[in-house]
Image (cartoon, grey):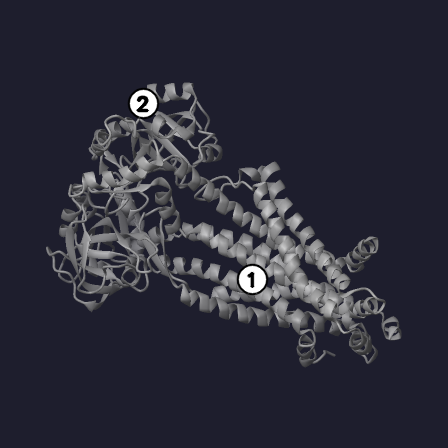
Amino acid sequence: MALPLSYNWRNLFVRKLSTSLTFSVVSIIVAVLSILLSFAAGINDSLRSTGNPANIIVLRTGATAESTSLIKPDEANRVLQAPGIAQDDKGRTLASQELCAQTTLPRKDGRGIANVCVRGVDEIAFTIHKEVRLIEGRLFNVGQMEVIVGKAAQERYKHLALGEIVPMGRSGDRAYKVVGVFEADGSAVESEIWGPRTSIMDSFRRTFLSSVIVQVKDAGLAREAIDYLQGPAVRLKAKSETEYYEDLTSKTREIVVLTSVLITLMGIGAVFAVANTMYAAVDSRRREIAMLRTIGFVRRSIITAFVLESLLICMSACVCGLIIAALVSSMISKQDFLSDTTWTVLAYDLKMTPWTIGTALALAAAVGVIGGLAPAVRASRTKVIEALRKA
Amino acid sequence: MNLRLVYLHRNLTRNVRRSLLTCAAVGLPIMIYVLSMSVVHGVDKFLDNSAKQLRIVVTQKTSIVNPLPEGHRKKIEALDESKQRLTSVCGVQWIGGQRENDPTPLSVMAADADSFVSTMPEYELTQDEIDAWQKDRQAIIIGSGPAGQLGWKIGDRVSIVPTLPPYRAMEFHVISTAPKAPDNQSIFFRKDYLNEELKKDGFPEGQVSFFFVKCATKKDLDEFREKIDAAFAGSLDETRSLDEKTFMNEFIAQQFDLPKNLAILSGLTVFVAIMAAMNTMSMNFRDRIAEMATLKSLGFSGGFAFSLIQTESLLLCSLGGLVGAIVPFVVFTYTPARDFQVPLIQTLVVEWVTCMKALGIAVFIGLVAGVWPSWMAMRMHVVRALRNLE
């Protein structure tokens, strides 16, 4: 027979101070864990949702990112010969020659500056990057000094409001007008500024391209096209767009490793704190336990009861920790980091994913069970006669 | 006094399990504190060296990624013909780089061969190394971090593929592993070699990512920082000059701001430790209400009760803190873990100063955790306390 849950619940309030201190310890640890994981999830999300498996990004062999890649115009033309490249209904080949330049902009929150990617594209780019949608204003006109800006960039950096003039170019002396704002399913390109390729190349005095993005008719044809592009005919580096952005997530692996080390240490600390509280609970209730045994509760019920009690503290603390994490995450949500591969900022929002919540719940449960088990076993071994006699 | 000591000892050993659990619950957060602060101090030390070297970093105004022309060096040097105030100018081109078939990124830079040694004196190259650097066009200095990881030694012929032009394997001769350099990640080779290779493949040559300008005094640094930017104002390639510490800081702040976040984290863990210790002390106190009341009724003062609980709390936490501080110190000083590399900066060094600080914090935790129970013990109403015991 099991003990009623209300028995455990009420017991928690007998030792208010002790329970609340243990509760706070577990809440804080859960909150720290969730916030750190939200960082990782946010970055992963913005990079993972970028890219279409049918899109192939072509870079200079040896370059690791668009910003370090230089492609000569004649090389870019050779890319067009790759097999399986799709055409749109107007018969245009779906290949977008792009230039990735950088400009420094002040941050809105006053925390210094950010190195923002300025992408020079032709009209065809919008057919290939279907996820890019204007949400305000209009598209730039080819040949004009006009740009559209990503939503994430606009939220974080100055000079990017609709109608504002943003100085760009190699000497920072070319005045571009912001004529539109775009969205791209929360992907990495939302941290960028897009403008007409010819104007951008001229302003940044660049004669080389950074990348060519081609779209194949079907994602299944990508392999063949990639082999052709890397082969002797073109000799450039080709990767599916999804793969390219996934490689940029290496930074999150560092955060995850750091998080795991810290959380393991903190988790063990929490186990000790919980065990301490539960031992005290058991010790102060020896007579009570003896009584329970006398009236017929078996040892297993006693163990279950005390582990449950420990779990109750930890799980409720976990809920509290998750709420704190959600509040903090929403306060510091708009983040970005300077990728050491692209040398441009990648914006991301902190995200509390089901996985984050699941991990937090699992941690709290583990702390509760491990911390509660030894005291519970001790409780179940209470010598009935002795405990009752002591009274 | 003697009585007190005996009593203290009895109290601590009365519930050994509880004492040990408390020590652990305090010791682990202290350990996290020590590790986090060691990383933070590593960064600080790195930045302090940058400040000490009195160097200006000159980059392109619109973005650090945009190159500056090599010719800027002559114009910067011309600002102080005497070379008394601007003692040395070195142009550096960042080319990233990795080994063939190994995606681990390396931080490889091409530096002006003639001025590297005088601009970066903290590398403390030996005379032999300096001679080799000047004689051998393919000389390369590998920071002790990557040298250790890749097993590269002086005299090795190594091959690195730059992630920037010329994008193909380049051969180098390792002439130094710079054991004295505070920045142990960077790899330097000669820029004349890079330019030659670029010319072969038809890539633009003579570009510089940043110029390091060594100044004689802090005053010269502040003055020339502005003079350099003024000299290029209105030209095709305007510059942005910062002192090296600010430059590095700007960089670190943009990459997750590790120092700041670790500092926040270690603050939180200390808070957690306070609560864990407080828990124990309040439990101890509750268990011993009767005893305390008896002591007081026997004539011991409230101050005695106060000091008894306070010292116990202090001892418990200091003990936990001691273990929490000593373990990382020993692990990162005497075991193979001492070669552990922290991304961004360098080898993790756990300094004893950090450990002493951590110990101080543990003592503080003990003080705070004991305050409430010991206060209660001091103010306790004897009759009421004894009556309440059922």
Residue at position x 40%, y 60% from top? A42
**Mark 1, residue position:** A29
Where does the image place residue B235, in percent across and percent down from the top left?
Answer: 15, 41
Compared with B386, B115 (above or below) is above
Residue at position x 48%, y 64% from top? A355
User: Dot 1: few (<14), some (14–19), or many (≥20) neighbours within 10 Å?
Assistant: many
Question: Is B185 left or right of B2, judged from the image as shown?
Answer: left
Question: Is B350 left or right of A378, judged from the image as shown?
Answer: left
Question: Is A331 left or right of B289, judged from the image as shown?
Answer: left
Where does the image place residue A327, in percent across and percent down from the top left?
Answer: 45, 69
| Image quadrant containing the N terminus of chain B | bottom right
Q: Secondary structure at mark 1?
A: helix
Disc 1 is attached to a residue of which chain? A
Question: Is A147 left or right of B291, judged from the image as shown?
Answer: left
Q: Secondary structure at mark 2?
A: loop
Quadrant in which residue B349 is drawn: top right
Where does the image place residue A43, in percent across and percent down from the top left?
Answer: 39, 57
**Mark 2, residue position:** B137
| Image quadrant containing the C terminus of chain B | bottom right
Residue at position x 67%, y 52% from top? B318
Estimate the spatial distance between the alpha carbons at disc 1 and disc 2, rounded to whole Å.
Answer: 55 Å
Residue at position x 57%, y 40% from top? B337
